[in-house]
Image: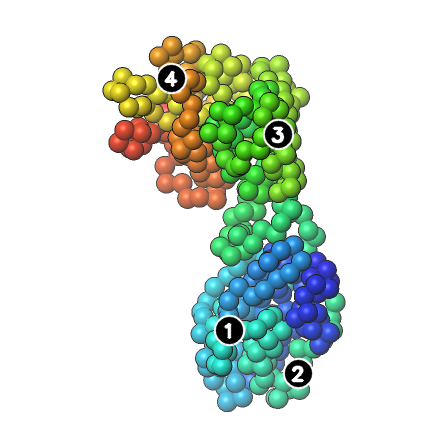
Amino acid sequence: MFQKLASHNHDLRRLLEKGYAIAVDSNHLVVRDIPYLDGEGGLQTGAIVAKLEFIDQERVTPTDHQVYFAGSVPHGLGGSPIPNLGGGPTTIALSEACSDVVVQRSFSNKPRATGKFEDFFHKIESYVAIISGPAMEAHRATPYTFRSVDEAPTDSVFKFHDTLTTRAEISDLAAKFKDDVVAIIGLGGTGSYLLDFLAKTPVREIRAFDLDPYHVHNAFRSPGRLGKSELGKSKAEVYGGRYENFRTGLSVTPVFIDASCRDEVDGVTFAFVCVDKGPSRAGIFDLLISMGIPFIDVGMGLNRKRGPISGLLRTTYYSAEHGQEVRERDLAPLTDDPDDIYRTNIQISELNALNACLAVVRFKQLRGFYFEDVPYHHLVMDIGDLRMVGECDLGED
C-alpha cells in the first residue's frame, strides 16, 4: 500500500527516500523507529502515527496538524518533558499487523510561521526534530533506519478508502461487522434505504432480493438518482448497478423469497425483512426461524382516519433464541389490512428512510457498535407525536 501511495505522492516518497520506516495501516501513516529520551535520559524507541486524508484513490493529504505517538512522554536533555507538544493520553485502533505500535498519546504542535503543515514530509520532519532531537544529540540515535516494514493486507470490502471510519476513530467498532453476511429481503421503500445504509457498513457480504421491476414511483421512495434507462428493469439490476462501484461482496438477485429458499439464505448471519404483504412475511418468517437466522422485520401501519396520514412505524427483532416466541406475540401482521393505504399512497420516502434508520441502528446495537441501554425486541414509533415505545420482556416466566 505505501509503495503505491509513494509513487503518487511526492511527500511520502521523500520520507521513504530519507530512510524512515514507514507503513500504512487502517488509513493511518505509521512511522516506526522514532528515538526519544525517557525521564532518566535513557534511549527509547516509539512510533508516530498520523491520519491519512484520501483526496482520491491515489493522493493523500494531512487532515490536521496533530499526530499520535506510541511511546511514553518524550523528554529533553535536561530531564524535563519536551514542552509545547500539547495533546494528551489517547488510544486508537490499528490492525494486527501493527500490534507492536500501541498509541498512548496525541501531540499537537503547529508550525509557527504558517499554522499548517505543507505536506506529510514537512509534518513528520517537524515532529521528529522535536521528539527525537534530544536522543539524536545524546545517543547519536537516528530515525532513518531504512527498515522495510510489513503492512496489513488490504481486505476492505470498500472500493474507496474508508476515511470516514478513520476520521471518527472508530476502526475498532467497525471491525465488529467483518464476519457478517446480511440479507435484505425486499427492496421497496424501506428496503432500498436499508441497502443504501448497509452498503456503507463494512459487513462482509450483502445479499439483497427483490423480483419486482423498477418504476417511476420507486424513485420517489428510494435513495439516489433516477436514470431513465433504469425504468422497467428489475430492482435487482438497478440497485446492483448503483452500488457495484462502491463495495465488493454485494449481490442483488431478482428472486421472490419464500419458505423454500434455503439455499439463498444459507450462511446468512442476519436478515432484514422488508415486505408489505402479510402472507409473504409469514413464509419468510418460517424460513428464517427454522434456519436459526436472527432478523429484523420492519413495517408501517398508516391510515387517513383524521385526514392527514397518521400511523405507526415498527421495528421488530427476532433473535435466533427467541424468534418463535416473538412471532407468537403477533407483533408483525401476517395478513393484509384492507384499510392500510401504505401500498397505494407510497410517496413517503422520509418514513421509509426513518424506518430503515431504526432497523439499522437496532442491528448495530446488537453488534456492539452503538450503546444499548434497553434490549428492546419490539419498537413502535407514532408519527403523530414522534414518541417511541418498546417491549423487552423476552424469556420471562
Secondary element under disc 2, as helix, strand or loop, is: loop
Q: CA distance from mark 2 to mark 1?
A: 28 Å
Please name the residue shown 54% across and 47% down the image.
174
Q: Which mark is residue 116?
A: 1
Residues 191 and 293: in front is 191
Q: CA distance from mark 2 to mark 4?
A: 75 Å
Pointer 4: what residue? 341
From the viewer's perspective, tell me whether residue 323 is left or right of residue 122: left
Badge 2 vs badge 4, beta-carbon distance below 8 Å:
no
> x%, y% of residue 258?
58, 15
Q: In which quadrant of the rendered image does the N terminus lie? A: bottom right
From the viewer's perspective, tell me whether residue 222 is left or right of residue 7: left
> Of circles 2 and 4, which is in front?
4
Up-down: is 73 above or below 2? below
Pointer 3: what residue? 229
> x%, y% of residue 279?
49, 12
Pointer 2: what residue? 141
Mark 3 is on which residue type? Answer: Ser
Label 2 CA crowd tier, 10 Å (few <14, some 14–19, many 20+)? many
> Of circles 2 and 3, which is in front?
3
> Of circles 3 and 4, which is in front?
3
Q: Earlier in the sequence, mark 3 or mark 4?
A: 3
> Of circles 1 and 3, which is in front?
3
Mark 2 is on which residue type? Answer: Ala
Q: CA distance from mark 4 to mark 1?
A: 57 Å
> x%, y% of residue 87?
45, 70
